[in-house]
Image: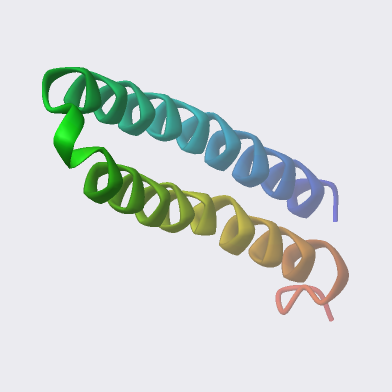
Amino acid sequence: MAASVLGAGFAIGLAAIGAGIGDGAVTAKAIEGMARQPEAKGTILVNMLISVGLIESIPIIAAVIAIVLVFANPFIK
């Protein structure tokens, strides 16, 4: 059971770190693109928001897997 709790913590932690790095990179590139081409601001913003939403789905999936590991662990009888 302790290994499941540790695994769940690592899963959520690493997913959150990865999503934070990904969100930062996407946002930085979008702002850079908007600064270079102000007329394409709307298109770049929409694409950025879609990308951030997809990136944020990874920690949500990790949280679901972590909850399954802790509360409905298939490896413990």
3 or 48, nearer to the observer: 48
Place residue 17 in its image quadrant.
top right
Q: Is residue 51 left or right of residue 53?
A: left
Return the x and y of residue 18 as percentages of the image width and height.
46, 34
Q: Residue at x 19, y 28 (%)?
A: 38
- Of the 4 image quadrants, the one containing the C terminus is bottom right
x, y percent for residue 19: 49, 38
Q: Going by the image, does 11 lie left or right of 45?
A: right
Colour convention: rainbow
| Residue in the picture at 74% in, 65% down | 69
Q: Quadrant of the N terminus?
A: bottom right
Image side of residue 77 versus residue 22, left or right: right
- The image position of residue 22, as x and y in percent, is 39, 33
Above-or-below relation of 63 to 6:
below
Q: In the current view of this chain or complex, which residue is farthest to the left?
A: 37
Residue 28 placement, left or right of 20 = left
Q: Position of residue 73 (x, y in %)?
A: 77, 73
On screen, residue 54 above or below 3? below
- Establish if 65 lies above or below 30: below
Q: Residue at x 12, y 19 (%)?
A: 36
